[in-house]
Amino acid sequence: MEKNQSHRQVTQMRQSLFDQGFLDEQFVQLEELQDDTNPYFVEEVATLFYRDSGRLLTNIEQAMDRCPMDFIKLDNFMQQFKGSCSSIGAKRVKNECNQFKEYCRTGNSDGCLQTFQQMKREYTTLKRKLEAYFQLVRQVGPREIATRPR
């Protein structure tokens, strides 16, 4: 009985990540790649994303510190980061990336600074939520969970 309750808790936590707009369909596609030989594939991909994305964020921060801002370089760095976010289904972070890119296009340095701060908050929040989710998944054990969000 407790096992079923734990599985329900995992399902509810996962669904809340979609309901709150943190994740999109790409996350489900990653889950569909999991199997018995690699039951924690999505967690591994997310871990790699967070490890590697730190470099991109550092590049963006360093480019933003330069005066005047090189909006073309910033846009290129953000395009790389946005691609990484898209690959794991980080919807809210990706949306902030789009806004940042729009500010780059219009040469709005204040907009870039504000959006970058918001993007980092979304990034950190998603990381915290995914870590809690993956910890619960590990406690409960792998299970078929690659279902379309409601």
Image (cartoon, rainbow, N blue to C red):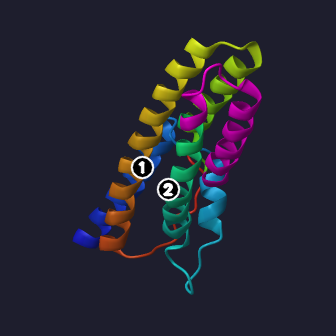
Residue assigned mark 1: 127
The span picked out in magenta is 62-88
User: Relative to residue 114, is residue 26 drawn left or right?
Assistant: right
Q: Position of residue 138 (x, y in %)?
A: 35, 72
Q: Residue at position x 58%, y 58% from top?
A: 147
Q: What amino acid does circle 1 point to? A: Lys
Secondary structure of the residue carrying numbered label 2: helix
Q: Does residue 72 lie above or below 25 as drawn? A: above
The circle drawn on residue 15 is none
Residue 1 visible to the viewer: no
Is the residue marked by circle 1 packed among few (<14), some (14-19), or many (20+) residues within 10 Å? some
Q: What amino acid does circle 2 point to? A: Tyr
Q: Is 65 inside the magenta-drawn segment?
A: yes
Q: Residue at position x 52%, y 35% from top?
A: 21
Q: Position of residue 52 (x, y in %)?
A: 56, 58
Q: Residue at position x 54%, y 64% from top?
A: 48
Of marks 1 and 2, the one in the foreground: 2
Q: Residue at position x 47%, y 26% from top?
A: 118
Residue 139 visible to the viewer: yes
Given residues 62 and 88, the one toward you in this image is: 62
